[in-house]
């Protein structure tokens, strides 16, 4: 079992303005258990998914596989040992918007929409939004590597369209181009558009230049 980094748990509890006791109650453990995780006395728990969900992060962040503390950290969608029941399947839009993770022209007059099925319980780890507010698409390019690779599938929550101060990952249209980028609001009112590939320079969008489709809440690794 992967080992949890206690300092990250402690930092997130403070940033989320919650407490060890509140987190413990939410995930069904005792407060001393959370304390032992933070101190490093204990570094494993069978409640890592519940802990990540409560702290609005990902298991990958808690164990140090990524430095992105959002729920959109890299996730491998495992094939279940048994077929999923109809009750656990949910359909969401699969939109071929030609999002380029460098930049691909977006022709919004020719957007094809299909329906794809995902596990409802899997999606619920990342967002509580209803299926009609979600969509999936594929990226193309390397500007978001290593977080998102070419042809990885991303799940977009269209109910979230206001970038926060944190560097979350968003599906956007910028000057007519579809992109998947990190956004950060600037004091002067502009939005910084950043790539995870350090070779790609940041850009800055003024009000009216940027349309936010939604926030990337999960990434399905292409295999």
Image (spheres, grey):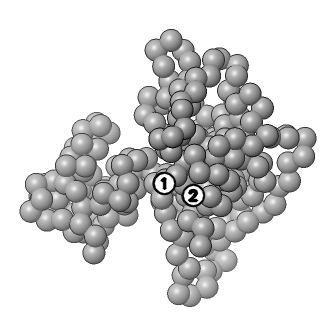
Q: Is residue 147 visible?
A: yes
Q: Give the quarter of the image for residue 165.
A: top left
Vertically, is 182 above or below 36?
Answer: above
Q: Toward the viewer: 183 or 145?
A: 145
Q: Residue at x 10, y 54 (%)?
A: 39
Q: Residue at x 54, y 70 (%)?
A: 77
x%, y% of residue 35?
Answer: 13, 54
Q: Which residue is mark 2?
A: 149
Residue 130 is left or right of residue 21, and the answer is right
Residues at marks 1 and 2 touching, judged by CB atoms closer than 8 Å = yes
Q: Residue furthest bottom?
A: 82
User: Closer to the camera, 115 or 88?
Assistant: 115
25, 103: nearer the viewer:
103
Q: For marks 1 and 2, give the CA distance.
A: 6 Å
Q: Position of residue 180 (x, y in %)?
A: 62, 43
Q: Position of residue 70 (x, y in %)?
A: 43, 47
Residue in the picture at 79% in, 40% down: 105
The location of residue 36, given as percent across then percent down, is 12, 59
**Mark 2: secondary structure:** loop
Q: Quadrant of the N terminus?
A: bottom left
Apparent side of residue 19 relative to residue 111 in the rendered image (left or right): left
Label 1 crowd bin: few (<14), some (14–19), many (20+), radius 10 Å? few
Element under disc 1: loop
Q: Residue furthest top?
A: 188
**Which residue sits furthest front?**
199
Q: Is residue 65 above or below residue 169?
A: below
Whether residue 158 is visible, yes or no, is no
Q: Is residue 209 above or below residue 215?
A: above
| 148 or 121: nearer the viewer | 148
The label number, if any, that marks residue 146 in the structure image: 1
Q: Tell me the residue at 48%/59% (across/down).
A: 74
């Amino acid at each position: 079992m992967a080992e949890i980094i206690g300092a990250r748990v402690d930092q997130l509890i403070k940033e989320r303005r919650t407490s060890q006791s509140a987190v413990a109650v939410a995930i069904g453990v005792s407060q001393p258990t959370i304390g032992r995780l933070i101190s490093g006395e204990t570094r494993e728990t069978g409640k890592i998914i519940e802990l990540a969900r409560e702290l609005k992060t990902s298991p990958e962040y808690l164990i140090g596989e990524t430095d992105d503390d959002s729920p959109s950290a890299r996730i491998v969608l495992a094939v279940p040992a048994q077929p999923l029941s109809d009750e656990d399947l949910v359909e969401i839009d699969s939109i071929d918007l030609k999002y380029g993770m460098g930049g691909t022209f977006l022709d919004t007059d020719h957007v094809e929409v299909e329906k794809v099925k995902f596990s409802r319980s899997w999606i619920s780890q990342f967002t509580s939004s209803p299926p009609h507010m979600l969509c999936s698409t594929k990226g193309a390019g390397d500007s978001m590597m290593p977080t998102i690779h070419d042809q990885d599938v991303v799940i977009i929550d269209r109910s979230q369209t206001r970038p926060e101060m944190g560097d979350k990952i968003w599906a956007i249209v910028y000057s007519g181009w579809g992109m998947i980028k990190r956004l950060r609001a600037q004091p002067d009112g502009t939005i910084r558009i950043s790539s995870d590939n350090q070779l790609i320079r940041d850009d800055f969008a003024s009000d009216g230049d940027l349309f936010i489709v939604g926030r990337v809440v999960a990434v399905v690794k292409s295999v």
